[in-house]
């Protein structure tokens, strides 16, 4: 991607997705902000705005910044996406058209790892079910039954050993749980056993914690065969993307006792969650809150703003994605 020249001209930016105050208030009067909360709003932008827009902030992963959306903007130079996962942004289109894409890595890593670890323990030790038991008054007459699951007798396979996978690994190590992992390439950053083949790892462990990017390469990689390989003590934790899991196969595996339990922060068609999952006692369901604390979301917002400001000041963006590297700044 080539460098943009800093000039005194005002820069038109589009905030695409839900309004986020730190982003909406983060720009000086050198910038003119336009808003489009969803795809339908793009169609309502005037031809003048479409023609002038040079930068875009994509503020939520359910807003598709796909080819059709990006093609509205002939002068677009940069798409600054909120979140580390950018499977909803067509980075191939961006590369073809000289547009740089940025995301928000690192600032959310430990937060998401905390949620993965919490979700794992909540699922194994049945925190949500036990809370319901207490509130219903049942403790007055009986003790809560012993949980079938425990972290103590588990072998965990992490699917994805990038920034967040490594942070989850550190937490599991501190809990003295054996860890192995699957990714396409072994990571020089860790010493855990690497499996290039997901099925082989699923056969060797009883628990999977999934933290790979979404998109075509990982679609439905957690399928019926992988779940079966975990066995009847099997537990699936998914904090990656709903697309990574074959959701009907997961429902069937939980209903039939093929696996024991699941903890899910992400779903195939958010915010819609299958009624079958909601009816089950052996699943813990979270509404995609991996990074959703005030402190971490603020840091993500600030990184979106900093990427756009840097670019229009003629500097390198802080966190371009690998598909659209920036040279010459
Ligand atoms: P990262 O540092 O890029 O790590 C990605 C890991 O996945 C790498 O180990 C990579 O290794 C592996 N991987 C990629 N494609 C793969 C494939 N086809 N098969 C097997 N492994 C593959 O990313 P990160 O910062 O850890 O974030 C990971 C993902 O977590 C994000 O993309 C996002 O979707 C999700 N996330 C969810 C939440 C939430 O709120 N629930 C929050 C943050 C992030 P190889 O390249 O060697 O395969
Ligand atoms: C974001 C996430 O909150 O970073 C990601 O990949 O899934 C979450 O941290 C989400 O992308 C918001 O759009």
Image: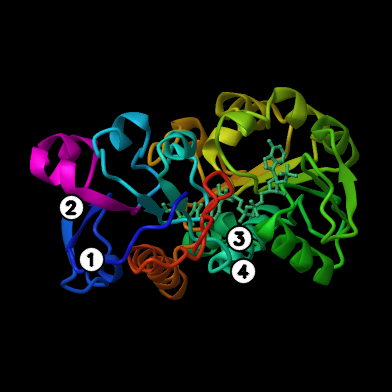
Identify the image quadrant of residue 215: top right
Marks counted in the figure total 4
Q: How is the image coloured?
A: rainbow
Query: Can you identify the residue that label 3 sits on?
Result: 127
Relative height, residue 215 to residue 180 (above, below): above
Residue count near mark 4 (Cα–Cα under 10 Å), binned few <14, some 14–19, many ≥20: many
- Stretch in magenta: 35-59
Tag 1–tag 4 contact (CB < 8 Å): no
Q: Tell me the residue at 62%/69% (across/down).
A: 110
Q: Secondary structure at mark 3?
A: helix
Residue under numbered circle 2: 35
Residue 97 at x, y = what percent?
40, 37
Mark 1 vs mark 3: in front: 1
Q: Which residue is mark 1?
A: 24
Q: Is residue 222 magenta?
A: no
Q: Which residue is label 4 attached to?
A: 110
Q: Looking at the picture, how far across and down is residue 154, in whole percent? A: 85, 52
Q: Is mark 3 within 8 Å of ligand 1?
A: no
Name the front one of labels 3 and 4.
4
Which badge, 2 or 3, is on the more N-terminal residue? 2
Task: Give the Cα separation between the discs numbered 4 and 2.
Answer: 31 Å
Q: Position of 63 compared to 13: left or right?
A: right
Is 271 positioned to the left or the right of 249 in the image? left
Q: Quadrant of residue 176?
A: bottom right
Q: CA separation, marks 3 and 4?
A: 22 Å
Instruction: Tell me where residue 318 appears, x and y as whole percent.
Output: 50, 66
Above or below residue 318? Residue 41 is above
């Amino acid at each position: 991607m080539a460098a943009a020249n800093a000039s005194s001209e005002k820069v038109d930016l589009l905030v695409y997705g839900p309004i986020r105050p730190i982003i909406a208030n983060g720009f000086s009067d050198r910038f003119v902000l336009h808003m489009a909360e969803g795809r339908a709003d793009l169609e309502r932008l005037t031809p003048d705005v479409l023609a002038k827009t040079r930068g875009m902030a994509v503020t939520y992963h359910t807003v598709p910044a796909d080819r059709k959306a990006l093609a509205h903007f002939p002068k677009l130079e940069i798409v600054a996406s909120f979140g580390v996962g950018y499977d909803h942004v067509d980075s191939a289109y961006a590369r073809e058209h000289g547009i740089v894409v940025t995301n928000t890595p690192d600032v959310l890593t430990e937060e998401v790892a905390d949620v993965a670890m919490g979700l794992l323990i909540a699922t194994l030790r049945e925190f949500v079910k036990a809370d319901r038991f207490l509130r219903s008054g049942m403790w007055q007459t009986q003790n809560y039954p012993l949980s079938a699951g425990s972290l103590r007798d588990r072998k965990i396979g992490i699917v994805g050993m990038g920034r967040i996978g490594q942070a989850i690994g550190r937490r599991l190590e501190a809990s003295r749980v054996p860890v192995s992992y699957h990714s396409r390439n072994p990571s020089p950053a860790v010493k855990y056993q690497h499996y290039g083949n997901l099925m082989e790892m699923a056969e060797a462990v009883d628990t999977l914690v999934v933290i790979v990017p979404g998109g075509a390469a990982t679609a439905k990689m957690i399928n019926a065969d992988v779940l079966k390989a975990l066995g009847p003590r099997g537990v699936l934790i998914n904090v990656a993307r709903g697309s990574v899991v074959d959701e009907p196969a997961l429902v069937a595996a939980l209903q039939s006792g093929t696996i024991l339990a699941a903890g899910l922060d992400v779903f195939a068609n958010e915010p819609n969650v299958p009624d079958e999952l909601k009816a089950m006692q052996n699943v813990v369901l979270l509404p995609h809150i991996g990074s959703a604390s005030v402190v971490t979301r603020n840091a993500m917002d600030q990184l979106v703003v900093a990427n756009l400001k840097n670019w229009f000041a003629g500097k390198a963006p802080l966190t371009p994605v690998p598909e659209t590297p920036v040279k010459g700044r």
